[in-house]
Structure formats: C-alpha cells, structure tokens
Amino acid sequence: MTTIAIVDYGMGNFHSVARALRHAAPDADIRICNTAAQIDAADRVVFPGQGAMPDCMRTLDASGLRDAVLRAARNKPLLGVCVGEQMMFERSEEGDTPCLALFPGEVRRFAGPGFAQALAPADASAAVAAPPHGDLLKVPHMGWNPVRQTRAHALWAGIPDDTHFYFVHSYYVVPRDAALTVGETRYGLAFTSAVADANIFAVQFHPEKSAAHGLRLYRNFVDWQP
C-alpha cells in the first residue's frame, strides 16, 4: 500500500487535505506526519501551507521538518499546496523571507510594486489594484478561477484545460525559469498557478476545496510515476 505523508509543521489545513486524499485514494495509507522519520518513511509527500510566510518558515524550522522536506524533494514524489508551493522558491516579499530555494524565483504580492508595473494603467495600494478592465481587484484573491495548462503533465490527466480551482492568496510565485510553469491563471495579470520539475508538482490553489477536479488531481498524484 502506498504511504502518503502530509507534512504537519503547524501551519496548514492538514485535516482537510487528509480527508480529500482519503476520498480520492481509499487504497492509500494517508498519514499526517510531524516527525522527520515519518516523512522519510513515506512513499510520497504532500506539503501544504497557509498563513504568513515568516510564520510558516519559522514554524517549519522549529518543527525540525525542514531537512525532511528537502530530502523528499530529492527522492520521492512531492506535492506542494498553496503556501507550500510558495515556500519552494528562494524568497518571498512577505517579510522579505528566505524560503527553501528548491526552485529559482521569488514570491510577490498582488498590488505590490511589481504587480502595479505589470498593469497598464495601474493604480495599486496595499489593498486593491485596478486591472486593465477598470474593475477593482481585491486582495486577497479569493474564489474560483480557471487554470490554463501551459504544458502537459501527468497530474493534469482527466482535468480539462481551463478548469476552475479554488484560490485564497495574496502572493503568487514568479519562477525565473519559465519551463517550471505548468499552469497559469489570470487575476489582473497572468500569474503562475502551478509548477513542476522532475518529482515535484506544486499548486497555488487548493485541490481539497476544488470539488471533483481537485480530487482528481490528488488521485493523479497518488498514481504519478515521475
């Protein structure tokens, strides 16, 4: 039986992820894990996250699980979810926080300086920005938005292009290597909403809150042979 570890470092919706995975893959052994030994022993790892980036990184380090996540990134299928995706990059604008540096790039805030420059014309503040169509763009980005699949991947199997997934976030990843992007979503501008490389796949949206297609993505992760 495939064992899947959900990394419990104190900053994620672990129980919702576990419920969705158990529904999507009743044949798998789904475990919420808070020790490095449990994560090391698992066949696959899910790395969720929510909350402020400085708190997430501090809590991950305090939990003693940082090295276990990095080991998993080297040798087994790893799925990052929401802030778990953001933590895979080098740095976040949120608190100017160094992250795990698994991927080259940074995490930027909607309505921040980089976001404002990308909108023409733009009128950005800490709370809202004006996208090209003139409507107010609320931050955080919250709700259902389509994900355009920018390249084929096993985790998109059975999921139509432009499927709507559920988002809740104020920050988004900006990979330096465009080849990392496998999914893109438009919210004022087009931003990377899914990345993949070798044995790692990560998404900004919440599959566990995204109905049948979110469950299909989790099932695809269980079946994935990178």
Image: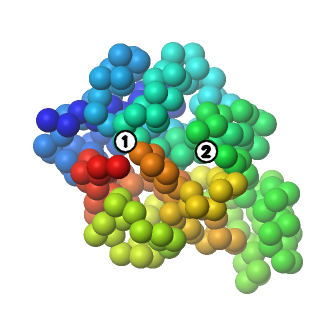
What residue is shown at x 35% (from left), y 59% (from top)?
Answer: 155
What residue is shown at x 68% (from left), y 31% (from top)?
Answer: 54
User: In the image, is residue 101 above or below residue 175?
Assistant: above
Residue 158, horizontal then vertical, whole percent: 28, 69
Whether label 1 touches label 2, CB < 8 Å: no
In the image shown, does 11 or 90 lie closer to the viewer? Answer: 90
Q: Give the amino acid at mark 1.
A: Pro
Q: How many numbered marks does the figure carry? A: 2
Q: Which residue does the numbered mark 2 point to in the structure image?
A: 103
Quarter of the image for residue 181 reads bottom right
What residue is shown at x 60% (from left), y 52% (from top)?
Answer: 169
Residue that protrudes farthest toward the bottom in the picture: 133
Cα–Cα gap, marks 1 and 2:
15 Å
Q: Give the amino acid at mark 2.
A: Phe
Quarter of the image for residue 92 reads top right
Camera sees residue 202? yes
In the image shown, does 100 or 84 lie closer to the viewer? Answer: 100
Q: Mark 1 falls on what kind of element?
A: loop
Q: Work out which quarter of the rendered image holds the N terminus and state it.
A: top left
Q: Which residue does the numbered mark 1 point to in the structure image?
A: 77
Residue 71, horizontal then vertical, whole percent: 46, 27
Numbered badge on residue 55? none
223 sits left or right of 170 in the view: left
In the image shown, does 101 or 118 lie closer to the viewer? Answer: 101
99 sits left or right of 83 in the view: right
Residue 20, horizontal then vertical, whole percent: 28, 47
